[in-house]
Amino acid sequence: MKQQADPKAAGGTRWRGAAGGILAALAGLAVGSLAAGLLGTPQTPVVAIGSAFIDRVPPWLKDLAISWFGTHDKTALRVGILIVIAVVAAVGGILAVRRYWAGALITIVLSGIAVAAAFTRADSGQTGFLPSALAGITALLVLRLFSRRLEPLVNFPDDAVSRRGFLQLSGGVAIGSAAVAVLGKVVGGNRAAVADARKQLTLPQPPSLAPPAGVQAEGAVPWATPNANFYRIDTALSVPQIVPADWKLRIHGMVDREINLTFDDLLKRQVIHKWVTLTCVSNEVGGDLIGNALWSGVVLKDLLEEAGPSKGADAIQSSSQDGFTAGTPLPTLLDDRQAMLAFAMNGQPLPVEHGFPVRIVVPGLYGYVSATKWLVDIEVTRFDKFDAYWTLRGWSAQGPIKLSSRIDTPGGKKVPAGPVTVAGVAWDQHVGVSKVEVRVDGGPWQQATLATDPSVDTWRQWHWTWNAPHGMHLLQVRAFDAQGNPQVESSADPAPNGATGLHTVSVKVG
Ligand SMILES: Nc1nc2c(c(=O)[nH]1)N[C@H]1C(S)=C(S)[C@@H](COP(=O)(O)O)O[C@H]1N2
Ligand SMILES: [Mo]
């Protein structure tokens, strides 16, 4: 007599199969991260897939992710990848109960994607694919164990020995994976080593950390952005970990003399401390991807002049340890704006997420064309010879910061009628802001009071007292540059070289 499949029993086997598939994937991921820790590569399977994904997302999706998740976009991506892996692995596990090869095929494709992704990463070295490959092999073996255990249950769903066997195997794999994952964390301790080295560093201190007199307008954001609140934008899913003692910078390409620098060499040079406002090209009108800090470092001009750029060179291509690159016009590095190799931010060694131990800061240029973090290489070259990271992805090769202004208060708040402080910031780094105006409900422009600015390389704060009448009102701001040109009023998206338009906020009065 042919055996009739019992639907309830089939369902139970399906759940067990799914659980087995997910546990096999978890075991693989745990082994992958341990392998990454042992090899000293950041390329765990999830990091490999995530990094390759980040390199391929279209700009609109990147902007959407930033606007949805803000600085948590990286966590959101990791969680998303884990969910996709879990779902695919569950399907593989279900299939593997009856046909191991079908589940195995899914596992091979999944880990194959991670291996391929790792191969595309500049920072994966020769061994970056190994964690993903080992993860795949582990998952295949564990999946085989599960399919062996579950096979008998297809025909004999009540077989207690097989059921118990499945539970024992599940428990064993779960505990084993957890143990391996913990070990991976311990081994991946170079994070701790870097954190430690950062703590031990003593760097030349700025004479004062206090904001210069008169720069703070009442009601505006703090003139100096604390490191902990400083916006962070980069493509690094796993933040590069560089111990200063291992840091080296090579300046080469179209130069008379190649320069090789260690961190100690850098500290022996003349150090400057300079307030510079950094801005991201992805900043929307009114957005907060902008921050002002006191940077300490070495003037890049001196180093470049020592190297001696060849005639015809018009750019540098700077590279990060993780493969990010930026293309910066050579003249902006050789003029008087004091573009620098920065190692400290607001009197602290650079936070690891902000480029420890050394990054570039160029006043007047968006970060994507200048502010390379985890800097390891500078090639003097020509713009017609290379495309930097974001240029390859459709953003403009050159990115001077656009004149902009923002209302920090009282946007979106309810205020009592009467005198109300309207305040914010305006910026046009390395050009300067000469005037800020505010208008209410599309009425005449009114001149705001400007705070002082220590140089044209920072934002400038402003405030204006509004005699607010009852009701809903719209406030708008516009700035003028040092030559008296007004900011562009027509709205444009951040891509390909920075947003334009007037920041408009609504306020309820009464
Ligand atoms: N290595 C590396 N450096 C980088 C980036 C990056 O993705 N990788 N992003 C750039 C961009 S787009 C900006 S706006 C600034 C942001 O610097 P912050 O994160 O310290 O604010 O860093 C720049 N330097
Ligand atoms: Mo940026």
Image (spheres, rainbow, N blue to C red):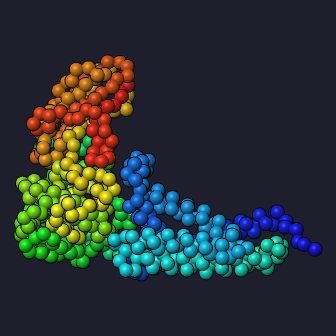
Residue 404 in the figure: left or right of residue 337: right
Nearer to us in this view, 253 or 436? 253
Q: Residue at x 51, y 62 (%)?
A: 81
Q: Pick the quarter of the image with the C terminus.
A: top left
One can see residue 442 in this view: yes
Residue 335 % position (x, y): 7, 55
Residue 243 in the figure: left or right of residue 39: left
Nearer to us in this view, 131 or 450? 131
Residue 66 % position (x, y): 39, 50
Residue 57 in the figure: left or right of residue 340: right
Instruction: Say if 298 sits above or below 442 in the image.
Output: below
One can see residue 289 in this view: no
Q: Residue at x 25, y 32 (%)?
A: 489
In the picture as drawn, the residue positioned furthest to the front comes out as 384
Residue 33 % position (x, y): 47, 74
Instruction: Say if 388 sits above or below 470 in the image.
Output: below
Residue 354 in the figure: left or right of residue 2: left
Instruction: Say if 392 sits above or below 262 in the image.
Output: above
Q: Pick the quarter of the image with the N terminus.
A: bottom right
Q: Residue at x 52, y 73 (%)?
A: 111
Q: Quadrant of residue 450?
A: top left
Q: Residue at x 64, y 72 (%)?
A: 103
